[in-house]
Amino acid sequence: ENQCMEFLASIIDVKVEDLKDPELFPVDSILDILKVLAEHEDVKAFFTKLGALLKTPVFKEFSKKV
């Protein structure tokens, strides 16, 4: 949880303590931050590439062993 909060705080350039303060950031504001992050072109590109990787025969074989 702390790593996620640190990551989100770094994205929007605030202190973790501020992000945890419900007066400054109500609980549902984290969902808004995640929504905007998910719409970022680099994040979309990452998940597109990851999706393609998961469909490859090599990865399918690897996942059977794990």
Image (cartoon, rainbow, N blue to C red):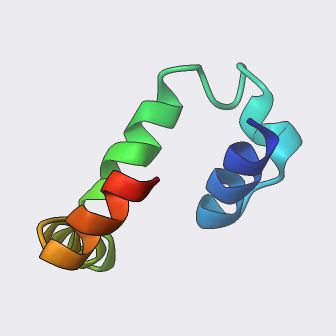
Q: Nearer the viewer, residue 58 or 41?
A: 58
From the top left corner, tell me how far across and down residue 51 is, in percent: 17, 65
Q: Is residue 28 left or right of residue 49?
A: right
- Decide: is 55 above or below 19: below
Residue 44, horizontal then vertical, whole percent: 22, 69
Whether residue 14 is visible? yes
Q: Is residue 7 left or right of residue 56?
A: right
Q: In the orientation shown, which residue stands out farthest toward the front?
A: 65
Residue at 60%, 60% in the rendered image:
12
Q: Position of residue 27 (x, y in %)?
A: 57, 20
User: Residue farthest to the right?
Assistant: 17
Is residue 49 something one can see in this rendering? Answer: no
Quarter of the figure that contains the N terminus = top right
Q: Residue at x 82, y 46 (%)?
A: 16
* Res. 26 image quadrant: top right
Which quadrant of the view contains residue 11?
A: bottom right
User: In the figure, is residue 22 to the left or right of 33?
Assistant: right
Answer with left or right where residue 23 lies relative to residue 35: right
| Number of marks present in the image shown | 0
The quarter holding residue 65 reads: bottom left
Q: Is residue 26 above or below residue 43?
A: above
Q: Residue at x 32, y 70 (%)?
A: 43
